[in-house]
Image (tube, coloured by chain):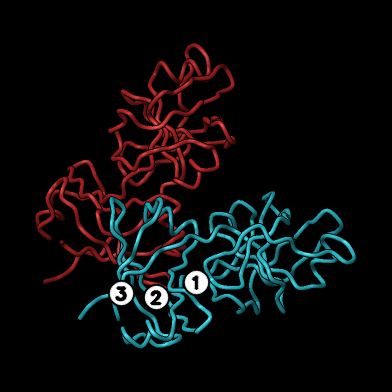
Chain colours: A cyan, B red
Amino acid sequence: MEQLSILIEGSARHVHVTCEALETLFGKGAELHNVRELSQPGQYLTEERVRLEGPKGAIDRVSILGPERPATQVEISLTDARSLGITIPVRESGDVKGSGAVKIIGPAGSIELTEGAIAAKRHLHLTPETAEKYGFKDKSSVSVTVPGERSLVFNEVVCRVSASFENRMHIDTDEINAAGISGEVFGTVVNC
Amino acid sequence: MEQLSILIEGSARHVHVTCEALETLFGKGAELHNVRELSQPGQYLTEERVRLEGPKGAIDRVSILGPERPATQVEISLTDARSLGITIPVRESGDVKGSGAVKIIGPAGSIELTEGAIAAKRHLHLTPETAEKYGFKDKSSVSVTVPGERSLVFNEVVCRVSASFENRMHIDTDEINAAGISGEVFGTVVNC
């Protein structure tokens, strides 16, 4: 059977904010300013940058992605978490209950986030057509082989299927580096 | 056939120095001070720390490993290389020709290393007895499966066989984090 080849994108560290958090960080009436569209329709990189602080360190100029969301969420790598001195779980986006704590600092104010810091679980965005064609179900796990001098096979890759998606694999910067990915690299999806 | 289970160790960023480099960085007559033995016999963590500088950033308090070596070598992750603003290849230890450039700063002086900065290629240290028993040859490549919520299979893992070794898998911090390894984790070696 034909195997799905999928473009791999690395997600750099970023923050999602609620409307309320945006005003706390950037001031009353603040708005997000779209810099460029991301691969998933409706998602965009903004001009807005914040500082993250933990007990052991800080990271400056972390991007906010738009649009606003129902919960504030900080997506960083485990390397970042270690340098900040915080502990974070590997979670799917939106699943933040009991996740890591971190301080977010903006030009107008700061937020002591008590939960919401996660390392994103690696995942595929799939259109219903692609999922159907290759037999991948929403929320199922697959494995993805990455070629190259740091070739590896990612297991435990969760499939997410929606008509609003483009076909992409999303992994974090630790995973990008562990796989030695540079530029446009395609993975091959294997049903487990 | 029985499969080899091997303890995985993460190599944090570190520097190997020549006797000459040690004196440049720490002063005439400087010596390395052993803090603790590492898993590979004869190798040890030292008290000595240096600063690494690149065009875009710096990393402080990087450990030197002893004993002294014939060539100065800086082993960092690709995450580190990006934060320093330098480009480094994935190489086996000792294979530094044409590798990355970085500045090393010690309390007594600094070195503009024109080559010697690498991301270490993942590898196994194997005793001759283990290599023989499982059919792994020196310099051959194998794959290693890592269990867990970030389960993956590392391909392109080079075997190194020596009577002076203990059985261990060595990977860098990006790879440790990509595999979600925390504490004592064993990989399963698969012959390719």
Q: Which residue is mark 1?
A: A121
Q: Which residue is mark 3?
A: A4
The secondary structure type at the circle numbered 2 is strand
Q: Is residue A28 left or right of residue B86?
A: right
The secondary structure type at the circle numbered 3 is strand
- Res A53 seen here: no
Measure the C-alpha gap from mark 2 to mark 3. 16 Å
Work out whether A26 lies above or below B95: below
Work out whether A8 lies above or below B119: below
Pinpoint the chain carrying mark 2.
A
Q: Is residue B78 left or right of residue B168?
A: right
Q: Is residue A29 left or right of residue B176?
A: right
Q: Earlier in the sequence, mark 2 or mark 3?
A: 3
The answer to whether the residue labelled 3 contacts the one labelled 1, judged by CB atoms less than 8 Å apart, is no
x then y, percent, for residue B83: 55, 42
Q: Residue A3 appears in which quarter of the rendering? A: bottom left
The answer to whether the residue labelled 1 contacts the one labelled 2, judged by CB atoms less than 8 Å apart, is yes
